[in-house]
């Protein structure tokens, strides 16, 4: 438990670190004004800070039972941070390998968001990445004829109430990479809890044949796993 909690905390720290260093020469930010709020430390984001506080609390509780264990905490932390940083970097590169039109800035922002909302909503990271690849090929601007929008192709007219209750206030927010990934991750998390079965949950998310959609998702799940972009902690 303590190892998993430390990993979660350091993943979020690494995400903030990567976004902070992803700048041009002389401090010119690579992000547009719309996304510049993410270029600071992760602790500037209230949602992330709250998630980290919960993680630290869990780690502290677990540490009471682990007292006396001979651990090189400093070395373990450095190793885990480096692994988390590389995992986020690998995921951003995977996103660009799947869609060369996605910019480095957007790929990194999406990689950070996939990690963050996988942790927040307890949904498998490889699953939400595969869904995003299937639905939009990681294009934040994507919009279907039926009105599904963003990286995760979420239907605002169907889920507006739930999304607004979770801080996603307008349909346009779904085209923001982080908010779009937050919306899709939230829905998948709820469906996984409701059905207790990944295939059934995906069928509900898709709104059609679970078998057909599962076959599509499976191909992209295999790509994520073969690329080894999801680190094991």
Image (tube, rainbow, N blue to C red):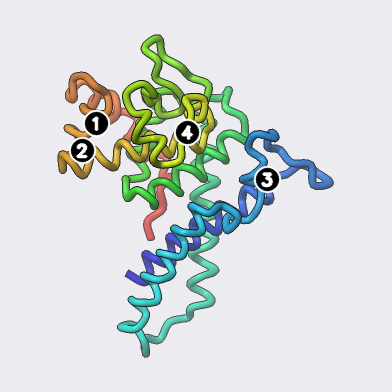
Circle nearer the N terminus (2, 4): 4
| Camera-nearest label, 3 or 4 | 4
Instruction: Give the residue at the far right of this rendering.
Output: 26
Q: Element at badge 4?
A: loop
In the rendered image, the quadrant that contains the N terminus is bottom left
Q: Element at badge 3?
A: loop
Q: Element at badge 2?
A: helix
Give the image quarter of residue 31.
top right
Give the image quarter of residue 197.
top left
The span from disc 2 to disc 4 (Cα, nearest Å) is 28 Å
* Front in this rendered view, residue 63 or 84: 63
Mark 4 sits on what residue?
169
Circle nearer the N terminus (3, 4): 3
Q: Position of residue 8 (x, y in %)?
A: 43, 60
Tell me whether circle 1 and circle 2 mark residues in contact (CB < 8 Å): yes
Mark 2 sits on what residue?
198
The span from disc 1 to disc 2 (Cα, nearest Å) is 6 Å
Query: Mark 3, residues whose alpha carbon is within 10 Å: few (<14), some, or many (≥20)?
Result: some
Identified at 40% across, 76% down, the residue is 60
Q: Is residue 97 above or below residue 166?
A: above
Q: Position of residue 178 (x, y in %)?
A: 51, 38
Mark 1 sits on what residue?
202
């Amino acid at each position: 438990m303590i190892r998993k909690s430390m990993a979660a905390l350091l993943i979020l720290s690494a995400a903030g670190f990567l976004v902070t260093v992803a700048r041009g020469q002389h401090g010119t930010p690579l992000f547009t004004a719309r996304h510049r709020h993410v270029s600071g430390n992760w602790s500037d984001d209230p949602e992330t800070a709250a998630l980290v506080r919960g993680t630290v609390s869990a780690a502290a509780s677990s540490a009471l039972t682990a007292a006396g264990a001979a651990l090189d905490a400093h070395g373990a932390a450095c190793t885990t941070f480096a692994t988390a940083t590389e995992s986020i970097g690998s995921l951003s590169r995977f996103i660009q390998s799947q869609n060369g039109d996605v910019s480095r800035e957007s790929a990194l922002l999406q990689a950070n968001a996939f990690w963050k909302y996988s942790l927040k909503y307890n949904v498998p990271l490889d699953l939400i990445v595969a869904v995003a690849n299937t639905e939009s090929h990681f294009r934040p601007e994507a919009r279907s004829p039926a009105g599904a929008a963003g990286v995760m192709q979420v239907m605002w007219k169907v889920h507006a109430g739930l999304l607004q209750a979770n801080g996603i206030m307008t349909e346009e927010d779904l085209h923001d990479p982080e908010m779009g990934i937050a919306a899709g991750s939230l829905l998948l998390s709820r469906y996984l809890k409701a059905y207790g079965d990944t295939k059934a949950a995906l069928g509900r998310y898709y709104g059609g044949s679970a078998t057909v959609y599962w076959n599509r998702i499976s191909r992209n799940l295999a790509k994520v796993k073969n690329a080894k972009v999801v680190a094991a902690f």
